[in-house]
Structure formats: structure tokens, C-alpha cells
Amino acid sequence: MTRALTFAIAIAGALSFLILGLPLPFLLGPMSACLLAALFGARMTGAGQFGFFMRTFLGVAVGASITPELIHHLPDIAISLMFVPLFIASIATVGYPLLRFVFKFNPVTAWYSAMPGGLQDMLIFGEEAGGDPRALSLIHATRVVVLVSIAPVMIAMTYGLDLSAPPGAPIASLPISQIVIMALAGLIGWKLAKRVGLFGASILGPMILTTILSLTGVVQTRRPAEIIQAAQFFIGIAVGVKYVGITRLEVRSNITAGLVYSAVMALVSLVFFKIIVTLELAPSLDALMAFLPGGQAEMVVIAIIAGADLAYVVTHHVLRILTVVLLAPVVARVLNMRK
């Protein structure tokens, strides 16, 4: 019953965005509706394993777009990738003091809340180190909501792109064999990546497997539009339900901290965006998508719909998350951060 209520609220949100002509209706509609419902006390739940399965199609979409021609261009982005560790260090230098000394979170909570990594990874590391899991969850969820909401508006205003256009070919126009291959690549890639403990397994596993199939000529078609729209829907739900059970105290402390930190993070992102564009290391749209540290799945969705260079964007986000996952716990131990 709880899940049925969640789906009903999410569908209402998507329909509202469609009727009003707002950008990314299948992502921002469910996300906004579930968030508002949670703030008003609605008891909702995510889509469970099926929601993770739907994310696999984002990995498949990215992998299918990586062709031999794109591989030849990867060395061209090496200099741009060198800015990613500096980008992370800049965010940590600004974010940690803000959350530690202005919002008074304990050192562990402030450190892992300031890290621009994956929500689940930072929540696990932070909780194991003695941080406040609820604060970590809400601050990172707010970061994702703010940046994912800002990005489409910036893109629409700056580039005049139609973000309501279908993100691929109609599923009816694709061969059944290709659809089956992509679905299997998503499922198998996810399960294999999860078994070996790869972060972001539901996206990176399918992406790696589909890339292999694309480079070998097995996958030869565009992503189905309806599947990408469905993936957006479930991702929107997953973000929105993070706010279920939120209290007024958490709104005043955790959400306020998340909003302020997101604004600071956006400013740091714009500085690096300006550097990359000024040095002519990437087109401005690609640079914007690569240096906005929203959720991995959410930024992939926006990049697909905006028509950005997926290889460039995804490579930067993977490097960002990998760097944070590998180094954040090490730095925390070196600095002897304790609750």
C-alpha cells in the first residue's frame, strides 16, 4: 500500500510537469512530488531492487554511445581530467569548515557530508566512522536535489535546448533482438559489478559490459526513449523518498546546511567550468555537465537528454567518485577525525 501511494504521488508529479511544460518531467516531476509529500508527512518507500534495475538502462545508454571513434578521442580529455582532484580538494576545503564550524556538525559528519561522492558510499563510510547517518543522508540528498534542479534550468536558459524531447529512438522502431541484448547487458553487468563490489554497480557494470558489446558490434542501435524515461521516473522517486520522516528540527539544521552547502558547491563548480571553457579543454555544455557534482545517475540522465558528450561527462564523474571513495577515508584517518 505504501509503495502504491509512492507511485501515485510520483505519477501525479510527472503529469503536472508535463502539463506545465517544465523541463525533465519524468525526473524532476516525481522527485519534487515525493519530496513535497514527504515534507507533509506522507509515508512512502522506494521501488527496491526494481528501481536499481531501471538504473541499469542508464549504464546501457552510456555504453551504447561509446564507439571506436569516441575511444580515439579519450586522450584529448586527459588534461581536463587532471582538474578533477583539484576540484574535489577545493570543495572539501570550503565545505568541511562550513559544515563543521558554521553548522556545528561533528568532525566525521562534516567531513563525509562535504565529500562530493556517491550518497550511498558517503553514508556507509560516515556511519561506520561514527557520523550521523540521518544528517549525512539529508545533506547529500539536498545536494542532489538542488544541483539536479539547477542544471536543467541553466541548460535551457543558456543553450536553448528542449529538455522535454524524447531521449532516444521510440522502442517500437528498434529490433527486438537489440532490446533483449541491452536488457540482458544491464542485468548481467549490474549483478557482476555488484558481486565484485564496484561502486555505482547498477550504472557502471552495465556501462562497461555494453561498451564492450558496442565496440565489438553486438549492440548497434540507439537507446529506447521510453526506457530512459522510465529510468528517470524511478530515480526521481529514489531521491524524493529520502526525505520521508523528516522533522522540523532536521529541516532547520540538516536541510538548511544542505542548501547552503549546495550553493557553495555550485559556485566552485562554476569556477572550474569557467577554467575548462577558457582553456578550451571541452565545449561548455560538456564542461558544465562534468563539473556539476549531482548524483551520478541524475547527471547521466541530464547529459543524455541534453545531448552532451557522454564519454567526457561520465569519465569525469567516475573519476570524481572513485577519487572520493578511495581517498576520503584515508584523509579522515590521517587527520584523526572522530565523532
Image: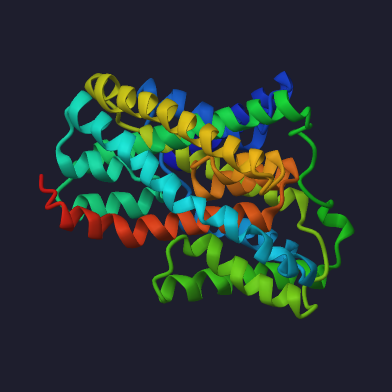
Residue placed most toward the observer, 47 or 139: 139
Q: How many marks?
A: 0
Q: Is residue 257 above or below residue 225?
A: above
Using the rendered view, name the quadrant where residue 40 is placed.
top left
Quarter placement of the C terminus: top left
Extreme-right residue of the structure: 173
Residue appearing at x 74%, y 61% in the figure:
65
Q: Residue furthest front?
A: 279
Q: Nearer the viewer, residue 82 or 5?
A: 82
Residue 227 seen by the camera: yes
Q: Position of residue 70 (x, y in %)?
A: 75, 65
Instruction: Please tell me in which quadrant of the rendered image residue 209 appears.
Output: bottom right
What residue is at 65 percent from the left and 40 percent from the top?
A: 277
Picture layout, residue 236 above or below residue 85: above
The image shows residue 237 at horizontal and vertical percentages of 50, 40
**Quarter occupied by the N terminus:** top left
Q: Residue at x 23, y 55 (%)?
A: 331
Q: What colouring method underlies this structural image?
A: rainbow
Q: Is residue 55 visible?
A: no
Q: Nearer the viewer, residue 68 or 194?
A: 68
55 or 294, which lies in front?
A: 294
- The spot of residue 334 in percent (x, y) is 17, 57
Q: Is residue 200 above or below residue 180?
A: above
Q: Quadrant of residue 323?
A: bottom left
Left or right of 264? Residue 254 is left
Q: Residue at x 73, y 41 (%)?
A: 306
**Percent coordinates x, y for residue 200 in the rendering:** 47, 60
